[in-house]
Amino acid sequence: LSPTVNFALRISFYCALCLVVSALAAVACLLVNGGRTVKNMRIIKAFVKTFKYFFGLRFEVKGLENFKVEGPALIVSNHQSILDMMGLMEVLPDNCVQVGKKELMYMGSVGLIMYLGGVIFINRKSTSSAKMVMSEVAKTMVTENTKVWVYPEGTRNCTGDLLPFKKGAFHLAVQAQVPVIPVVYSSFTTFYNPKTKLFTSGKIKVEILPPIETKGLTSDDVTDLSDRCFSTMRETLFRLSGHPGEAKDSS
Ligand SMILES: CCCCCCCCCCCCCCCCC(=O)SCCNC(=O)CCNC(=O)[C@H](O)C(C)(C)COP(=O)(O)OP(=O)(O)OC[C@H]1O[C@@H](n2cnc3c(N)ncnc32)[C@H](O)[C@@H]1OP(=O)(O)O
Ligand SMILES: CCCCCCCC/C=C\CCCCCCCC(=O)OC[C@@H](O)COP(=O)(O)O
């Protein structure tokens, strides 16, 4: 099989698996919990955790104890590919919803399962409406004691480096006065690269970093907070990916 065909087959299989299993999981969610609730994430997680075996992916997780903070928290992580959904479910703590672009809602059964799991959809084309939704989330995460997972790069990026962070996640953490927990996944570039049609089996290192407190911070501190997270996450990314410091040139 040519690499192009092999890549297309594996990605198509991934999408088909997501669509079929989402439909099954949706039935399970509706039967067990009856509608849209973060409790459905447990069911979704149980299904998705089997996916890695189909693709020969292995996860090596460190720092899970850092999720054990009392009460709500904001989780930020790097975003490389649609495959990230597997890495997300591998470590997802209880009572945690993700922020996603609203276009994802229209992916058939995958959109349905995201809706049922409580995913917060934002319109990236309208800054004001995205900010409004996120301010609302800052309130509900405290009253409902939920964690929120945001990809601060705002889009997928498979270069082996981080894109500059958008500020929305950090405004959210400061408004809610909740700690920020950074999570870093090692670079996929050795086994997955859509440009060169590479998709083989591989190992992904995941590290959950210690929470960064935001108590007492105001909107003036958001840039600082974002920069701090960015530099710790970038350092961790390079360390986990085994090319400290020079990833920009080698990508
Ligand atoms: C069983 C089978 C299963 C199969 C599937 C199962 C699926 C299960 C669930 C899985 C779910 C996975 C979901 C994954 C989804 C991944 C994504 O979709 S990523 C894309 C969407 N996410 C994001 O974009 C989040 C990050 N983006 C941001 O935070 C942005 O800041 C923004 C809020 C979206 C706004 O972006 P933009 O319009 O580009 O504007 P900015 O330049 O960022 O900001 C302008 C300006 O405003 C300031 N600001 C931002 N937010 C606030 C705020 N809340 N309050 C006050 N001010 C704010 C910001 O600081 C800027 O000002 P500055 O002066 O320039 O600093
Ligand atoms: C009836 C409609 C049928 C539609 C069929 C679509 C099939 C797609 C099926 C499965 C794909 C699995 C997706 C899992 C969820 C991953 C979410 C994700 O990673 O979205 C990308 C988004 O973060 C960033 O978007 P951009 O990089 O800015 O773009």
Image: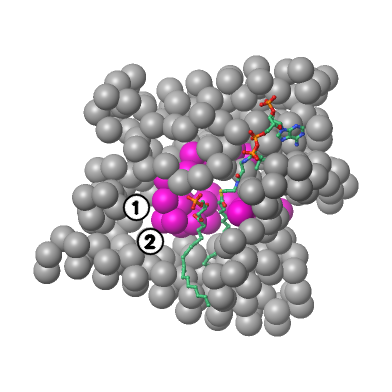
* Residue displayed at 36% across by 26% down: 239
- Residue 104, located in which quarter of the rendered image? bottom right
Residue 83 percent across, percent down from the top left:
41, 56
Q: Which residue is drawn at the image coordinates 25% and 43% (left, top)?
A: 190
**Structural crowding at the residue carrying mark 2, measured as other residues with C-alpha within 10 Å and reported as few (<14), some (14–19) or many (≥20):** some
Residue 41 covered by magenta stretch? no
Instruction: Residue 196: give x, y in percent of width and height.
Output: 21, 50
Q: Amino acid at mark 2?
A: Lys
The N terminus is located in which quarter? bottom left
Find the distance from the CA under tag 2 to the CA under tag 1. 7 Å
Ligand 1 sits in which quadrant? Answer: top right
**Which label number is shown at residue 52?**
2
Residue 58 is tagged as 1
What span is in magenta? Answer: 75-101
The residue at 33%/44% (across/down) is 188
Task: Report if residue 8 is visible in the image.
Answer: yes
